[in-house]
Image (spheres, helix red, strand yellow):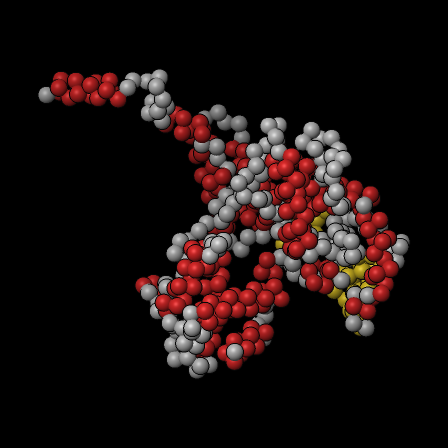
């Protein structure tokens, strides 16, 4: 226990968010439990023990994890043993370094991004039938027992229309999306930073139709949720960040937190603080976040996961010949971000290519465009909108933007099928040509 506790104290001093610390702790705990089952422990483990643990996690357990997930666990193990060697608890790491710095615990296969996107028909089915509780023929489903379908539909529309990550769109505040007294409405544009990946600041644009979907939720469902939860929030006021001032133009809020008057820039507010931020509304204390659940505060990760899982169950149960084809694996909220990226990238490339009928001419223009006009490069535009740390991440979307079916048909039109000559005829023709050549 002492080395694990020491490592935990070491992590607590690092600038890591709460979710990352929890994931690190779980990864170390799983490793320790496995080593105890082998009659070993963290300090006496050898390379074969750690390799055995890797195989258990990636191959033999009931639901093996992928290369990306194992890469994170491998990083935690490497960090743990680096800490123990640095502190003098161990003289060397249990895993050897192979050629080019690769160790035995690294993932065996380097996987690319798991890009999964939806067609228009699939998205409408997911949003309207799965989340909205309709029947596939757009009629109202009398057996639907879901709660706040307009909220869930608005979440899907904002996720797709803005291309933001789950932590970004699910924590949006009312002033940020323009649903605040005195704001003109329509499309919204705001900065995200604290809730963005790696804390990288960027500007998010939410189109008018997506904001309209959120406005519909605020008009029809949100007031009832807020009214029912107001009394409970009043009882918990000491634990909440109660606002007294909202500066929409400056993007700042001011209120009382833990008995002290505090000011925050909205873009710098982390998800944990956004969840407890409230203001005095029509019925009493009301959450400043757009999305609220039965308790009156912002839904958490498990809640949104539950909404999605129940939507998938409805989609599969109601699927028939008229519904779009469903994937083998259940959809994720992040698939809407992938769909946004592919749709925007395809649109920008088509707009850049123009209407030239010659495919080769369009490709030459495309190459020239990338080298001469970096500022308007569709790939870089999408990369900036998505907030990718490197354009290399966005490159992986390229393999999904082209429809190569027609090109494959042209390349192999004489290779397959029964309409052309048989193998015997082709062989005899080739043999006769060879005989004449002699």
- Could you say where residue 326 lies in the image, as x and y percent from the top left? 57, 37
Judge from the rendering whether residue 78 lies leftward or rightward of residue 207; answer left or right.
left
For this rendering, which residue is in front, 135 or 38? 38
Judge from the rendering whether residue 129 lies leftward or rightward of residue 415; answer left or right.
right
Q: Is residue 264 visible?
A: yes
Judge from the rendering whether residue 155 lies leftward or rightward of residue 89; answer left or right.
right
Residue 407 falls in image quadrant: top left
Looking at the rendered structure, the number of numbered marks drawn on it comes to 0
Q: Is residue 187 visible?
A: no
For this rendering, which residue is in front, 48 or 401? 48
| Residue pictured at 71% horizontal, 45% vertical | 152
| Residue pictured at 49% horizontal, 69% vertical | 33
- Could you say where residue 236 lies in the image, as x and y percent from the top left? 82, 65
- Could you say where residue 208 lies in the image, as x and y percent from the top left? 73, 40
| Residue pictured at 48% horizontal, 32% vertical | 403
Most extreme residue toward the bottom is 88
Q: Is residue 158 above or below residue 110?
A: above
Query: What quarter of the picture does the C terminus occupy?
Result: top left
For this rendering, which residue is in front, 301 or 51? 51
Most extreme residue toward the left is 438
Q: Is residue 174 above or below residue 194?
A: above
For this rendering, which residue is in front, 318 or 435? 318
- Could you say where residue 246 lies in the image, as x and y percent from the top left? 81, 59
Q: Is residue 32 above or below residue 392?
A: below
Residue 192 falls in image quadrant: bottom right
| Residue pictured at 59% horizontal, 28% vertical | 321
């Amino acid at each position: 226990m002492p080395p694990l506790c020491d490592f935990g104290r070491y992590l607590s001093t690092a600038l890591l968010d709460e979710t990352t610390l929890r994931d690190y702790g779980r990864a170390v705990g799983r490793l320790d439990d496995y080593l105890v089952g082998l009659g070993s422990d963290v300090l006496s483990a050898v390379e074969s023990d750690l390799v055995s643990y890797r195989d258990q996690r990636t191959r033999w357990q009931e639901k093996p994890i992928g290369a990306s997930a194992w890469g994170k666990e491998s990083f935690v193990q490497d960090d743990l043993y680096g800490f123990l060697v640095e502190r003098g608890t161990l003289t060397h790491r249990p895993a050897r370094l192979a050629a080019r710095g690769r160790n035995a615990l690294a993932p065996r296969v380097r996987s690319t991004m798991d890009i999964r996107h939806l067609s228009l028909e699939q998205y409408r089915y997911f949003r309207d039938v799965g989340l909205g509780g309709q029947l596939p023929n757009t009629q109202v489903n009398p057996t639907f027992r879901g709660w706040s379908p307009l909220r869930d539909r608005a979440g899907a529309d904002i996720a797709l229309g803005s291309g933001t990550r789950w932590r970004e769109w699910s924590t949006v505040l009312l002033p940020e999306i323009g649903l605040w007294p005195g704001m003109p409405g329509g499309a919204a544009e705001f900065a995200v930073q604290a809730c963005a990946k790696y804390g990288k600041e960027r500007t998010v644009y939410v189109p008018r139709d997506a904001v309209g979907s959120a406005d519909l939720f605020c008009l029809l469902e949100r007031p009832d949720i807020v009214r029912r939860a107001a009394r409970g929030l009043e009882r918990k006021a000491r634990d909440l960040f109660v606002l007294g001032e909202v500066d929409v133009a400056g993007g700042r809020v001011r209120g009382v937190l833990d008995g002290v008057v505090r000011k925050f820039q909205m873009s710098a507010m982390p998800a944990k603080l956004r969840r407890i931020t409230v203001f005095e509304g029509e019925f009493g204390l009301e959450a400043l976040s757009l999305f609220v659940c039965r308790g009156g505060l912002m839904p958490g990760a498990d809640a949104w996961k539950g909404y999605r899982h129940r939507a998938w169950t409805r989609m599969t149960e109601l699927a028939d010949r008229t519904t779009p084809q469903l994937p083998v694996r259940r959809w994720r909220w992040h698939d809407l971000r992938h769909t946004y990226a592919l749709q925007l990238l395809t649109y920008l490339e088509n707009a850049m290519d123009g209407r030239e009928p010659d495919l080769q001419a369009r490709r030459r223009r495309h190459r020239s465009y990338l080298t001469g006009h970096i500022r308007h490069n569709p790939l870089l535009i999408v990369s900036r909108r998505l907030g990718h740390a490197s354009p290399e991440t966005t490159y992986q979307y390229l393999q999904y933007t082209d429809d190569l079916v027609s090109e494959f048909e042209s390349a192999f039109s004489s290779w397959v099928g029964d309409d052309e000559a048989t193998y015997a005829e082709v062989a005899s023709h080739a043999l006769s040509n060879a005989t004449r050549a002699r």
